[in-house]
Amino acid sequence: MNMGILSGFSGTVGTVIGSVKKNGDDIIRAKTKIRRVSQTEAQVNQRTKFGLVTQFMKPLSPLLKIGFSAIAGDSMSGYNYACMQALKKAVTGTAPDFAIDFSKIIISEGGLHQVVRPTAEIADGKVSFHWEDNTSSSNGQTTDQAIMVAFNTKNYEYSYSNGDFTRGSASGSLALPNSEVGDNLEIYLFFRTADGTIVSSSQYLGTVTVTE
């Protein structure tokens, strides 16, 4: 009687392997899956870059949701969009010494006009911001809310102000994030309309160092 695959055979058929022992017994076993664990240098480098970016961006997720609400759309979160842009534009160096160029990081993107000549410095234990009110020469309004951000790159702590100051106030202050003397803070600023529908693209104001 022909038993098909249940009769004796040698070799591979689909996902099974047949063989015959010395005593004449037929053996059928499942084909072993070979697990590929090797990684190319390019894959390792990409994972390293991705780790750098996500370590910086993850704490900022609540702000990124605001900053990219109109850009990312339904198919991508603000966090994912920010990481994608950072991977394209903000990672510098060569393997294995990759680093982030903080001046190339964006935390918001939109059609609202930026302010003119913004600055930031540490004064009286706070980050003090100043800018020129340019409502007369832009699509901005004096009621646009200033979103000021200070990010500690040593411990990934940050502080931000959301709506406490406006474009028309031309200045504002922000409490220092958890930090120690010598820590560097990366400073960013963007604005959104009072109804929250439009934001400006973020502006990088540079690095300030905690001195006291």
Image (cartoon, grey):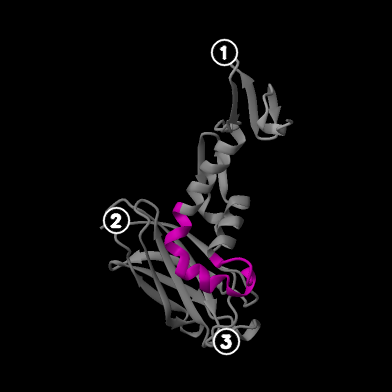
Q: Position of residue 117 (x, y in %)?
A: 54, 69
| Real-space CA distance between mark 2 and mark 3, rounded to the nearest whole angstrom | 35 Å
Would residue 32 be visible to someone looking at this image? yes
Report the mark closest to the observer, 1 or 2: 1
Q: Amino acid at mark 1?
A: Asn
For label 1, count other residues whose C-alpha is less than 10 Å away and answer few (under 14), some (14-19) or many (20+): few
Q: Which residues are magenta?
A: 55-78
Q: Nearer the viewer, residue 151 or 67?
A: 67
Residue carrying label 1: 23
Between residues 18 and 69, which one lies in front from this camera angle?
18
- Could you give the CA–CA distance between mark 1 and mark 3, rounded to whole angstroms? 91 Å
Residue 210, horizontal then vertical, whole percent: 32, 57
Q: Which residue matches tag 3? A: 141
Note whether 198 is above or below 65 in the view shown: below
How far apart are labels 1 and 2 at the CA level? Answer: 84 Å
Nearer mark to the viewer, of 2 and 3: 3
Which of the image's four quarters has the C terminus? bottom left
Label 2: how many Cα within 10 Å (few below 14, some 14–19, many 20+): few
**Is there CB contact under 8 Å for labels 1 and 3?**
no
The amino acid pointed to by label 3 is Gln
Element type where label 2 sits in the image: loop
Q: Vertical placement of 2 versus 89: above or below? A: above
- The magenta stretch spans residue 71: yes
Mark 1: secondary structure: loop
